[in-house]
């Protein structure tokens, strides 16, 4: 299939993007890597009047260390972040999750923020953002605002971004030296996860985040639980995620994976 007709704007500045979004309201879409959007256009699941290409804006293609956070611009490709020399020592969880995102070919085009905007609950980058407690940086012609990850994802492929807002970037806290772990189960490497889990040791105990089960990636913090107490906590969490049967896996299988992978990862980060 071919997409319906639309106007195309190759933005030369952030102001061009914001003005285009403001003028077209909900009838404009931002094009970055295009790995999700182009497919949606071709299947006519998205029918924008205006497509705004942001990849010519150098300002949005920066990875910067700002104090205790790393700011990743809207135009940063997944492959660029994976090749960033400081990734492993500043964002070790991202370094573990990124190789599971699609394939080398898609990572060379797809952007970090594009994955977040698409908000697929099985995708690795939304899960990682939630696990780290990161922020999404939004901007329109009137203001900037920072939205915590847990408040950004509103449902399956839904976010709290307003129609006139640009995802300018994300801010991830530096977790240098922290113990982290990541694992996912998919039909094939590069497919969206049936279940993906990320664990991180935190000052009060441990955090486990799960994607691919609920409509949004979800995290839980626990103290240092062991034995049956940990089993009970994982079992409760698995049921609270509201797994459903689909063509890829049963709800029971997903709950079993949450319990099994969760226990393994928590043991790994608390060693």
Image (tube, grey):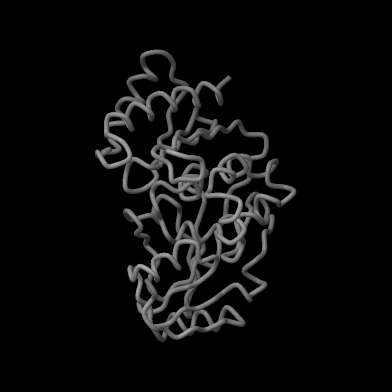
The residue drawn where x is 39% and y is 75% is 2
Q: Can residue 119 be seen in this view?
A: yes
What is the x, y in percent for residue 181? Answer: 55, 32
Image quadrant where one finds the N terminus: bottom left
| Residue farthest along the front direction in this orientation | 1
Of residues 211 and 59, the one drawn nearer to the viewer in this rendering: 211
What is the x, y in percent for residue 7? Answer: 45, 86
State the image quarter where residue 160 is shown.
bottom left
Q: Is residue 152 above or below residue 3?
A: above
Q: Is residue 84 above or below residue 113?
A: above
The residue drawn where x is 50% and y is 80% is 18
What is the x, y in percent for residue 178? Answer: 62, 34
The residue drawn where x is 58% and y is 19% is 271
Q: In this view, does 46 lie above or below 240?
A: below
Of residues 75 and 70, the one drawn nearer to the viewer in this rendering: 75
Q: Can residue 209 be seen in this view?
A: no
What is the x, y in percent for residue 78? Answer: 60, 55
């Amino acid at each position: 299939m071919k997409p319906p007709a639309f106007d195309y704007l190759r933005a030369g500045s952030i102001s061009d993007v914001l003005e285009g979004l403001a003028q077209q309201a909900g009838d404009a879409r931002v094009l970055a890597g295009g790995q999700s959007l182009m497919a949606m256009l071709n299947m006519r699941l998205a029918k924008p009047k205006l497509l705004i290409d942001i990849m010519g804006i150098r300002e949005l293609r920066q990875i910067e260390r700002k104090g205790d956070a790393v700011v990743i611009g809207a135009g940063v490709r997944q492959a660029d972040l994976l090749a960033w020399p400081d990734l492993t020592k500043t964002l070790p969880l991202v370094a573990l999750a990124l190789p599971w995102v699609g394939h080398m070919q898609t990572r060379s085009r797809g952007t970090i923020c594009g994955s977040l905007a698409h908000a697929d609950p099985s995708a690795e980058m939304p899960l990682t953002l939630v696990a780290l407690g990161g922020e999404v940086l939004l901007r329109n012609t009137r203001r900037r605002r920072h939205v915590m990850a847990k408040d950004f994802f509103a449902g399956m492929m839904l976010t709290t971004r307003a129609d006139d807002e640009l995802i300018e970037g994300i801010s991830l806290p530096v977790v240098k030296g922290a113990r982290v772990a990541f694992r996912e189960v998919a039909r094939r490497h590069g497919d969206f996860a049936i279940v993906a889990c990320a664990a991180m040791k935190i000052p009060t105990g441990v955090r486990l985040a799960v994607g691919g089960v609920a409509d949004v990636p979800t995290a839980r913090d626990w103290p240092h639980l062991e034995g049956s107490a940990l089993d009970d906590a994982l079992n409760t969490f698995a049921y609270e995620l509201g797994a459903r049967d689909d063509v890829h896996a049963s709800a029971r299988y997903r709950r079993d994976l949450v319990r099994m992978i969760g226990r393994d990862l928590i043991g790994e980060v608390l060693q």
